Every structure is written in structure tokens, then in C-alpha cells.
Image: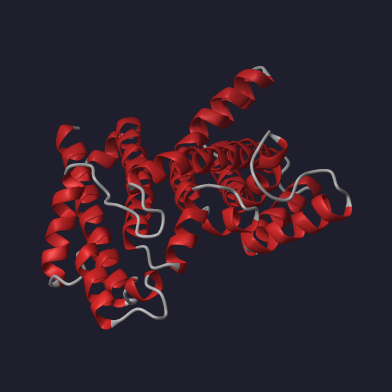
């Protein structure tokens, strides 16, 4: 088990280094933020002074080495546009992203597991057909389109829920459901498939023939079908934490995604790099935990 964990840790570290390098290079190739920071009347001397102040006159390998050195010390640099430490901006925005992702994950997992289990138990019936159709639609509709439809119906026409900004739980409902629709559909489909496989297993058929109580049978059924669902749920949570950019922008949710969009418009390298790094690290960490739990639950994986 120790060797298995060490291998996963090494793979996670390699992924982070590769992502950091690619984002660093692509950001430099996209253009210089100096053009956006100086006035239209700036002279060549002003542009050179600003480039030197931001450290952009050095060769790219020097900038990369300096960035890695700061990163090793937990320093993401200073924002060009906000004139503030990037770490403080991330710390202030990340709780909003985490709240949105967790709310979407709770919706997706609870509704997805419930619908998938009902579809498997009622396999071949109307409930199964409705759940399967709902799952196909949920995985086909983009989250940004669903978010716009929710705003038009529930916020503009009906006036039931606020459309923009953060605040109470009512501000969280629409973006959480829009963001959680895709993983909910994926979880429901996998739950149905895993539950059907468990129902056809010999020991479950034996339990049914012995006439065990429905509650005991259901608990054993869910336990046998839970392994692939747990794996997918962990992956979906990582994707939710790292994929909130579009939904946050539509609902003006003050999270990391909206911070990244604003930084892209001003070519604020340090913010974009920090956001990508934090979201990648979160995704990799959750996948690492899923891999470890999978190896712990199923010894065959470790070999």
C-alpha cells in the first residue's frame, strides 16, 4: 500500500509541474500586460521602465526560475492590476468557489444516487425510462445554457430567486443546480449500471431468495454498488471545484473563476497562474484521495 501511495504522489507532482510550466509559457506567449497598464501616451522609456518593474525584461527562463522559487515559498507574486498579493485574492475568492462546488456536489450526489437506484430497482419500467432520458439530457445540455435558462425563468419571469451576486442560500440555488446538472446525470447513470450489476450477483440473488428484509437488502445492495460511484463522485467533485468559471461569470459569483476571467482580460499573469495552479492542485488532490481509497477498498487495484 505504501508503494501504491508513493507512486500516486509522484504522478500528482509531475502533473502539477507540467501544468505550471505550460500555463507559464502560454501566458507569456499571449502578450505583455504592459500594453494594458500604461496609458496611450506612454513613451518607449515608460514602457521599458514598467517592463523592468514587473520583471518582464528578463529572459523567460529567468522569469520561470524566479517564479518557481517564489512558488516554493508559497508566494504567488503580486497582481499587476489589483496591486495586491495574489495569495490574498485567492484566499478571499476560494471560499465562494468551494461553497458553490460543494452545494452542486451535494445536489448531484444525492439526486443522482437516488434516481440511479430507483431506475435500477424499477428496471424496464416507466421510472427507469424517465431517469435514463433525464440522464442523457443532463449530460447533453451545457451548464452555461442551463444557467441562462434558469436566470430567465426563475429570476426574471417568476422572480423566485436572485439572478446575480452572493448572499444567502437563495443566491446559491440557481448556480449550484446549473453546475451540478451534468455530474448528477453522470452519477445517476453509473449508479443505475452499478446497481444492476450488483442485483445480478449470485450473493444478492441468494439474499433475495432467502427473503431478507427490504432495508437489509437495500443496504447490502448499495454497499456492493458503491465503489464505482465513490470513484466517479470524487472525480466529479474535483471537476466542480476546477470548472466553475463559466457559471460564476454568468451569476456574478465572486469566486476564483470570475477572478480568473477578470485577470485574463488584463493579462494579469500571476493571478491566472495561481488560479490554474490552485484548481489543478485541488483536482489532483481529490483524484489522489480517490485512488488511495480505491486501493484501500479493492486490494486488486494495488497490484
Q: Residue at x 21, y 43 (%)?
A: 9
Is residue 228 among the parts visible in the rendering?
no
Residue 8 lies, in percent from the top left, at 22, 44
Q: Is residue 168 above or below residue 241?
A: above
- Image coords of residue 10 (percent x, y): 17, 47
Q: How many marks?
A: 0
Which is nearer the eye, 275 or 117?
275
- Say above or below: 6 vs 245: above
Extreme residue in the right direction: 158
**Camera-nearest residue between 178 and 7:** 178
Q: Is residue 51 left or right of residue 266?
A: left
Check the image and tell me how it is coloured: secondary structure
Residue 51: image quadrant is bottom left
Q: Quadrant of the C terminus?
A: top left
- Residue 278 pos. (x, y %): 35, 48
At horizontal 38% and vertical 69% (from top left) the residue drawn is 37
Name the one closer to the observer, 165 or 147: 165
Question: Is residue 65 toward the left or the right of residue 104 in the image?
Answer: left
Amino acid at each position: 500500500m505504501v508503494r501504491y501511495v508513493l507512486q500516486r504522489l509522484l504522478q500528482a507532482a509531475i502533473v502539477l509541474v507540467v501544468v505550471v510550466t505550460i500555463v507559464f509559457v502560454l501566458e507569456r506567449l499571449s502578450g505583455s500586460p504592459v500594453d494594458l497598464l500604461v496609458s496611450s501616451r506612454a513613451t518607449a522609456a515608460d514602457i521599458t521602465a514598467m517592463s523592468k518593474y514587473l520583471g518582464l525584461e528578463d529572459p523567460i527562463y529567468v522569469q520561470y526560475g524566479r517564479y518557481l522559487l517564489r512558488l516554493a515559498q508559497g508566494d504567488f507574486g503580486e497582481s499587476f492590476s489589483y496591486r495586491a498579493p495574489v495569495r490574498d485574492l485567492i484566499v478571499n475568492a476560494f471560499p465562494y468557489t468551494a461553497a458553490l462546488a460543494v452545494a452542486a456536489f451535494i445536489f448531484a450526489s444525492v439526486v443522482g444516487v437516488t434516481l440511479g437506484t430507483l431506475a435500477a430497482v424499477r428496471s424496464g419500467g416507466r421510472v427507469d425510462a424517465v431517469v435514463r432520458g433525464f440522464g442523457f439530457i443532463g449530460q447533453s445540455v451545457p451548464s452555461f445554457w442551463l444557467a441562462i435558462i434558469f436566470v430567465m425563468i426563475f429570476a426574471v419571469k417568476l422572480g423566485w430567486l436572485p439572478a446575480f451576486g452572493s448572499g444567502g442560500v437563495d443566491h446559491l440555488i440557481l448556480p449550484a443546480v446549473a453546475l451540478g446538472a451534468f455530474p448528477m446525470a453522470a452519477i445517476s447513470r453509473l449508479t443505475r449500471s452499478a446497481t444492476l450489476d450488483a442485483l445480478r450477483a449470485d450473493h444478492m440473488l441468494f439474499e433475495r431468495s432467502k427473503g431478507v428484509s427490504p432495508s437489509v437488502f437495500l443496504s447490502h445492495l448499495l454497499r456492493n454498488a458503491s465503489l464505482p460511484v465513490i470513484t466517479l463522485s470524487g472525480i466529479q467533485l474535483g471537476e466542480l471545484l476546477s470548472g466553475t468559471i463559466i457559471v460564476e461569470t454568468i451569476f456574478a459569483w465572486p469566486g476564483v473563476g470570475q477572478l480568473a476571467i477578470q485577470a485574463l482580460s488584463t493579462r494579469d499573469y500571476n493571478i491566472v497562474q495561481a488560479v490554474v495552479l490552485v484548481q489543478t492542485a485541488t483536482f489532483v488532490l481529490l483524484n489522489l484521495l480517490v485512488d488511495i481509497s480505491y486501493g484501500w477498498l479493492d486490494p486488486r487495484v494495488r497490484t
